Image (cartoon, rainbow, N blue to C red):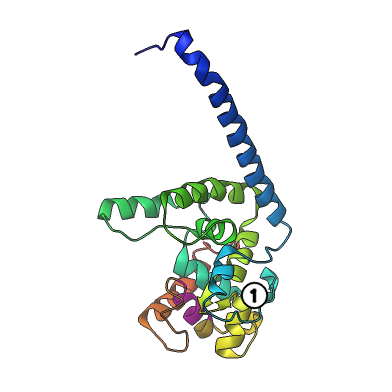
Amino acid sequence: MILLPPLLLRPMRRPLAWLRWFALRVLLLMLALVAFYAFVNPPTTLTIVHAAREHPIAPHQWVRIDNIAPVMRRSVVAAEDANFCLHWGFDMTEIRKVVASGSSRGASTISQQTAKNVFLWQDRSWARKALETMFTPMIEALWSKRRTLEVYLNLAEFGPGIFGVGAASREYFGTTPDKLTPVQAARLAAILPAPRHRSPLQASNRSRAIADGAATIARDRRADCL
């Protein structure tokens, strides 16, 4: 182990102290933002602002979790993060599977996606991923699972200019989120990985698998937190 002489360390003390001061305040700001949005609905996001430059944004009204059909909640969890109720923000089982398979697909949980949608941007980068990894446990610590899912469903993109389950229900099926049928819920959930390239108006193998998955997590109690 190499020890630096005190005379060499002395000039580094002030920059290191400033760096600690800055990092602590960034963490406190992040924590304050997460705590604030535990009770206040985010008015918009960077993703919505950027999307507005390309497409008109469909009218968006916040929908409380109790006004979203339970089958819609289960369908999204089955499609995006089947162990949502069981993990603490990171699904280590899925991460291990991805690593073991050498796959390039992601293993992001709904908590991680919510952190990205609310506080960050969509472009892939190490900086964004690092911040997402910091925001996620804060969300898990300060928000309930129902709150996390509520925020996710209200900010997720369901098509060009269509954000939130309320707008998606109206635009695609002419209904409200509380009246979505199992088929409609599964079709909406099926487009979330690629909302600009898939249509919920057409049946697909993925939507049928999601409908089965929603029923499965209801039976095995993995949807109990919803």
Disc 1 on helix, strand or loop? loop
Question: Where is the N terminus found, in terms of image quarters?
Answer: top left
Question: Where is the C terminus found, in terms of image quarters?
Answer: bottom right
Q: Residue at x 61, y 90 (%)?
A: 174
Residue 186 painted magenta: yes
Q: Which residue is mark 1?
A: 68
Residue 192 place in picture, x, y as percent: 47, 73
Please determine whether, in this image, residue 16 is positioned above or below residue 173.
above
Residue 85 lies in what quarter of the image? bottom right
Residue at the limit of the structure toward the front, as seen here: 11
Residue 188 place in picture, x, y as percent: 50, 79
User: In the image, what residue type sits under mark 1?
Assistant: Ile
Please determine whether, in this image, residue 31 is positioned above or below residue 153.
above
Q: Is residue 8 left or right of residue 42?
A: left
Question: Which is more toward the observer, 120 or 140?
Answer: 120
Question: Which is more toward the observer, 172 or 128?
Answer: 128
Residue 122 place in picture, x, y as percent: 48, 62
Please determine whether, in this image, residue 112 is positioned above or below residue 32.
below
Residue 162 place in picture, x, y as percent: 56, 79
Q: Is residue 146 left or right of residue 157?
A: right
Tell me the magenta residue range: 185-192
Please determine whether, in this image, residue 70 is positioned above or below residue 220.
below
Q: Residue at x 65, y 60 (%)?
A: 147
